[in-house]
Amino acid sequence: MAEYTFYALITATGFVAAGLVASLFQLVTGQPIRFGFTPRSVPVDAAEILARMTAGPAIIMRNAVKAAVKEGREPYWLALSTLLSVLWSFFTGVVILELIYSFSASL
């Protein structure tokens, strides 16, 4: 049972990171983050790609809920989007917790 709690903690870490990055992006730019990309300069592009990689679950869920409510898509699309978002959040959480662990171990 403890393993499932650990997996839930990792997934929650990824969801929280996705929400924070999506909110920070919207605070800085004034528009919600999207998967679309327009090239500018190399540092800005790198930061935007990293932000989209981290905020991917939030983008997916926002688009899935909008499609389910406004367009009336079938419920299985929302379920598949949720599954994809959970998996993406899990792997994002693994990367974030590994980075935190490696930084704290080096101190």
Image: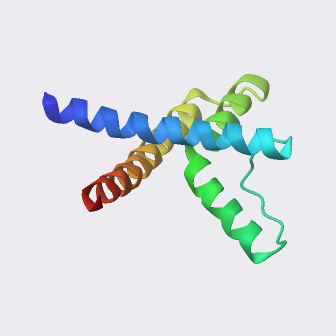
Q: Residue at x 78, y 29 (%)?
A: 71
Quadrant of residue 45 in the image? bottom right
* Residue 97 in view (yes/no): yes
Q: How many marks?
A: 0
Q: Is residue 95 above or below residue 28?
A: below
Q: Residue at x 45, y 42 (%)?
A: 14
Q: Position of residue 60 (x, y in %)?
A: 62, 42
Quadrant where the C terminus lies? bottom left
User: 98 left or right of 22?
Assistant: left
User: 53 left or right of 39?
Assistant: left
Q: Is residue 74 above or below residue 106?
A: above
Q: Position of residue 52 (x, y in %)?
A: 64, 55
Q: Is residue 75 above or below residue 43?
A: above
* Residue located farthest toward the left when viewing the structure as drawn: 1
Quadrant of residue 102 in the image? bottom left
Quadrant of residue 23 in the image? top right
| Residue sitting nearer the eye, 11 or 70 | 11
| Residue sitting nearer the eye, 74 or 3 | 3
Q: Residue at x 44, y 51 (%)?
A: 92
Q: Position of residue 91 (x, y in %)?
A: 39, 52
Q: Is residue 42 above or below residue 19?
A: below
Q: Residue at x 73, y 26 (%)?
A: 72
User: 66 left or right of 86?
Assistant: right
User: 87 left or right of 49?
Assistant: left
| Residue sitting nearer the eye, 41 or 4 | 41
* Residue 80 in view (yes/no): no
| Residue sitting nearer the eye, 48 or 35 | 48
